[in-house]
Amino acid sequence: MTDLAFSTLGCAGAPLDRVLELAKGNNIGGLELRAADDEFTHVGLTAAERRTLRSRIEDAGLEILAINSYVRLCAVEEQPLDAHLELAADLGARGVRVFPGDDPAGADPAGTAEGPTPGEYRALDRVTTAAKDVHIFLETHDSHSAGSRMAALCRLLDTETPGHNAKVIWDSAHTWSHGETPAQALDLLRPWIDFVQIKDSDSTQDYKPVSIGTGDYPIGRLLQALGDTDYWLSLEWELKWHPDLPPLDEALPATWSWISAG
């Protein structure tokens, strides 16, 4: 049976009780916790608050796949990566989600440029010096939405920092929007994937997220490509950024039906 998680981006600002209710009522086994000042998960939590949050989630039988930060690993400005890694370790999460966030001027979406960009070297330095108690999860997003570009960065990390703790969250809608089929993206990213984010989107509307089952994201081809792999699937329901989407209590049952039909 597929292991399904969801990101609290889909219920931004909701209290923990509501998140646990959604998980229990929809056969959910894992969570991505959005880390922000207006959420119950943030780097300002005290040690006691962290212990309580961890125990409540563990008592509910849930696994925290990631603490979803907004750190941009390739960016010039100082990034609070260590604080998020410490939070993830305290909560028992598998890792911290970061965005690549490279300078668009230096970006090469196809990953064919000669050598790494300055931003990718910054990312390399941050991964090299970061604590290794939990993973740094690079999401296929923004400058590295294409699997080819992310794979090039991961190969750089493998070469320059053997034994690093970086892995990949494969946002499968983003690689698809950059012209890669699920099978192609999986082949590119397989050595580094930790889990897979899913959502439906509409290629005729510039890949805008849409209600589950109303877009043309090829969920069947994704499931076929994944085959007998044991990756978690996590619904990244972007309700905070797209308030026209239905709420999670509608999207989660629809997602199970979508997966079953795929």
Image (tube, rainbow, N blue to C red):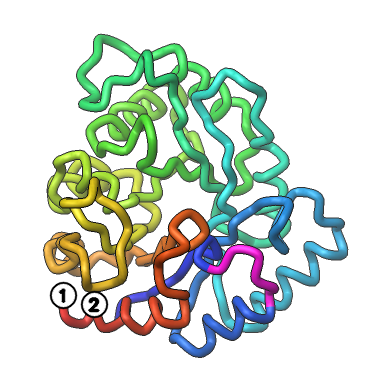
In the image as oriented, which residue stretches furthest toward the bottom?
25
Residue 70: say if magenta.
no
Which element type, helix, strand or loop, lies under badge 1?
loop
- Rendered view: 82 above or below 97: above
Which residue is at a point 39% across and 45% down the rendered structure image?
A: 168
Which quadrant of the structure image shows residue 245?
bottom left
Which residue is at a point 29% across and 34% down the rendered structure image?
A: 151
Please report the bounds of the magenta region as a residue range.
11-16
Q: Which mark is residue 258?
A: 2
Query: Which residue type does callout 1 highlight?
Result: Gly
Residue 94 at what x, y percent from top left?
A: 55, 56
**54 and 240: which one is in front?**
240
Query: Which residue type does callout 2 highlight?
Result: Trp
Q: Are marks 1 and 2 in contact (CB under 8 Å)?
A: yes
Residue 243 at what x, y percent from top left?
A: 47, 62
Circle 1 residue = 262
